[in-house]
Image: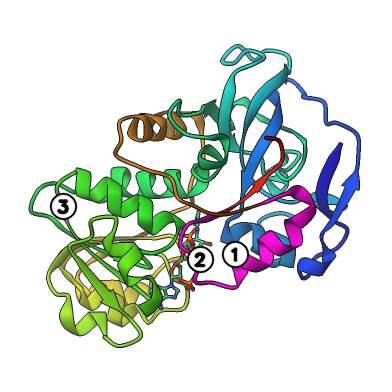
Amino acid sequence: MKAAQIKEYGSVENIEVVDIDVPVPDAGQVQVEVYAASLNPFDTSVREGHARQMAELTMPATLGGDIAGVVSALGEGVTAFKVGDKVYGSSQALAGNSGALAEYSVTGADSLAIAPLNVTMAEAAALPLVGVSALQAISEHLELASGKKLFIQGGSGGIGTVAIQIAKNLGAYVAASTKGAQVDYVKGFGADEVVNVDSQDYSTVLKDYDAELVLVRGEDWDKLLTVLKPGGVAVSLVGPADEALTSAHNVTVYAQGTNTNTTWLDQLRGLVEGGVVTPQVAHTYTLDQVQEAFATREGGGVSGKVVVQIKQ
Ligand SMILES: NC(=O)c1ccc[n+]([C@@H]2O[C@H](COP(=O)([O-])OP(=O)(O)OC[C@H]3O[C@@H](n4cnc5c(N)ncnc54)[C@H](OP(=O)(O)O)[C@@H]3O)[C@@H](O)[C@H]2O)c1
C-alpha cells in the first residue's frame, strides 16, 4: 500500500510516498481502509521533531492523525465495530498507531467512532482533533449558557470555528480574534464580535468575559487574561499560563491535552448530525500531493481544513 512517510525529522521535502506492507491490527486495534485524512498543526510538529519530548517516532514513520474510512479488519477482542462500518477518529504514529496518511491504518478501537452520517469522508476526516478539542474544552471547563461571554483567540482556525458553532448553540455571546483576511469567514459562523488583530488590540475592546479559549501560541498572557472578569476561566490548547499572572488576575487557566476517544467522537457526531457543527474543508489533495498539502496548511490564511483524499 501507499503511505506518506519520513525517515528523519525535517521539512515537507522529507515526506516521501512509499510502498509498504498493509499494517495488521493487534488485540484491541482496528484496521481502517482510509478514505481521507486531515492535517493539523500537530502533524507539522511531529514531522519537524518538536513533539519528540512526548515520544520518539520509530523511523520510517507514517505521518498524520485524523482519519475517516471503512473498517477492513478487527484485532482480537474488538466488539464495538464490524467490518464495513464507516468510522472517523485518530491514528497517530506518535501514540503507537500506524499513522493516518496511508491507504490502510491501524489504530486503537478507543480512538475511533462511527462517522457522522450526513457528511462526506473528507468532511468527517476534517473533524476529529479540532472537533474534540473544542467540545472537550467547552464541556469540561467553560460553563457556557445564555448570557455568558466567551472570547476565542484564533477563531478562524480548525478548533476556533467549531468552538464558535458549539458556543453559539449554547446561547453564549461570542467574540473571536483573527487576522484581517479571515474576518468575514469568522463572522459567517455567527460570532457576535470579531476583532481583527491586524488593526485592533482585543485587550482594549473586550472586557469582563466569563470564559476564554486560547488557540494561538506565543501571545502575551497578561493581555489574554485582561479580557476575563475576576473568577473567569480560560482553557489553553497551547500550554499553561504563568501562575503568578493567573493569581494576579484572579482567574483560572486549564491547559488541555485533547483526548480524541470514542466518547468524545460520539458526542461530536451528535452535534454534526444535529446541524450544530458543520465541518469546513478548504482544500483537498491526493496522497501523491501530500507535500503540497502540508505546505498549504503551513502557509497560513487557510479558511478551513486541508484534507488528503486517499480513496474516492
Ligand atoms: N493541547 C492539545 O491537545 C492540542 C490539540 C489540538 C490543537 N492544539 C493546538 O491548538 C492550536 C490551534 O489549533 P488549530 O487546529 O485550531 O490551528 P489552526 O487551524 O492553525 O488555527 C489557528 C488560527 O489562528 C489564526 N491566527 C494566527 N495568529 C493569530 C493571532 N495573533 N490572533 C488571532 N488569530 C491568529 C490563524 O490564522 P493563519 O492561519 O492565517 O495564521 C488560524 O486561522 C495549535 O497551536 C495546535 O497545535 C493543541
Q: Residue 297 — which label? A: 1
The Cα–Cα distance between marks 2 and 3, rounded to whole angstroms, is: 26 Å
Q: Is residue 53 visible?
A: no
Q: For the residue marked with disc 1, what is the amino acid?
A: Arg
Q: Is residue 290 magenta?
A: yes
**Residue 291 falls in image quadrant:** bottom right
Name the one closer to the observer, 39 or 123: 123
Q: What amino acid is found at the position of numbered circle 3 in the picture?
A: Ala
How would you rate the neighbour count of disc 2 (Cα within 10 Å): few for under 14, some for 14-19, many for 20 or more?
Answer: some
Q: CA distance from mark 2 to mark 1?
A: 7 Å
Residue holding disc 2: 302
Q: Secondary structure at mark 1?
A: helix
Whether the residue carrying mark 2 lies under 8 Å from ligand 1 is answered with yes
| Magenta span of residues | 285-305
**Going by the picture, which residue comes out furthest to the bottom?**
199
Mark sitting on residue 172: 3
Q: Is residue 174 above or below residue 130?
A: below
- Magenta stretch containing residue 103, yes or no? no
Identify the colour scheme used. Answer: rainbow
Quadrant of the image occupied by residue 27: top right
Picture residue at 16% right of the left edge, 80% below the top: 205
Q: In the image, residue 22 lies at what x, y percent?
A: 85, 31
Give the image location of residue 303, x and y in percent: 46, 62
